[in-house]
Amino acid sequence: MPVLNKGLSGWGVISVDVLALMANRYQSLSPSERRVADFIQRHVDQIVLMPLQVLASKCDTSDATVLRLCRNLGFSGYQDFKSALIPQLLRQGMQLHAGLQQAPEEKQPDNAALALARSLNDMIRSSLLNVDSQALQKAAACIVAAQTVVTIGLAGSAGVARIFTDSLLSIEKKAYCLSDRVEIERLTPCLAKDDVLIGISHSGDTEEVCLAMEKAGDRVAATIGITNFSPSRLQQAAGIVLLTSIPETLLGSYSCISRIVQLALLELLLTYIVPR
């Protein structure tokens, strides 16, 4: 069994031999789950940089099957599963499929800072220039007209949701942030037809966020999804979708970069709400 720790992202894996765990539970898996497990065993060095939807497609199965496999192995989701693979790959000395180059031993800090600055600039620029301007305008109009704006997110997305909620409160818009699984489950069904629900999930498959968006449906004025992946469950559930453009990285949604770009996108949305 994996060793679990309840932190900001819920129950997460600290240390476990993922491949051995999968082998031990292989006989208890369904045929479709076994196809996914077989693919992971053969291409483990590629999995940490592979979105959930791509893995499901390569295994000729559904996103739900991949998530079910992860949870049957004791992980809270696909991102937690991938994160548990990283130390195992590093211990085994595998080359990651992305072809990451090892940094020079005496690399100067200013060079590292410059590289990060360029990378951040590229990702922010790509996200802001490629976002659907009509979706931005529609999202802004819905927020301006809303009686209440509720923004939901877990783990890192919760921090982004809190910052955006603070920004809305600063312009005297009634707004709340929900970042607890039980709160999201119990309070989002109480939203009214003149409210707006915003769901943030980098992966687009956070169960609680997606379920809340799906249940809200036509009961609220609008549902707005912030995610990095299309197609994804969140993208399908949201009435309005705002996409970031962040290449898949080792840390995925656990990277600060994804949160910085999300905040940049939401800052752009604020300029539509309050012209400057």
Image: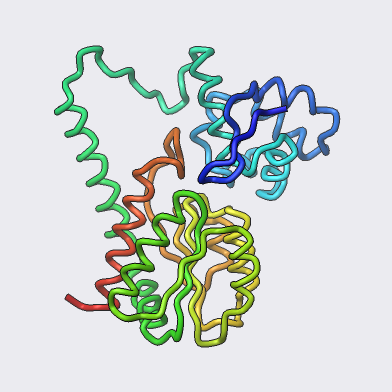
| Residue located at (60% from left, 36% from top) | 5
Residue 210 x %, y %: 60, 61
| Residue located at (69% from left, 49% from top) | 62
Position of residue 229 relative to residue 43, above or below, is below
How many marks the image carries: the answer is: 0
Specify whether 199 is left or right of 4.
left
Pick the front one: 99 or 124: 124
Position of residue 20 relative to residue 199, above or below, is above
- Outermost residue, right direction? 27
| Residue located at (43% from left, 84% from top) | 146
Q: Quadrant of the N terminus?
A: top right
Quadrant housing residue 27: top right
The answer to whether residue 260 of the structure is visible from this angle is yes
Residue 32 x %, y %: 78, 40
Residue 125 x %, y %: 25, 53
Coloration mode: rainbow
Q: Quadrant of the C terminus?
A: bottom left
Residue 82 x %, y %: 56, 34
The answer to whether residue 224 of the structure is visible from this angle is no
| Residue located at (61% from left, 75% from top) | 216
Specify whether 10 is left or right of 34.
left
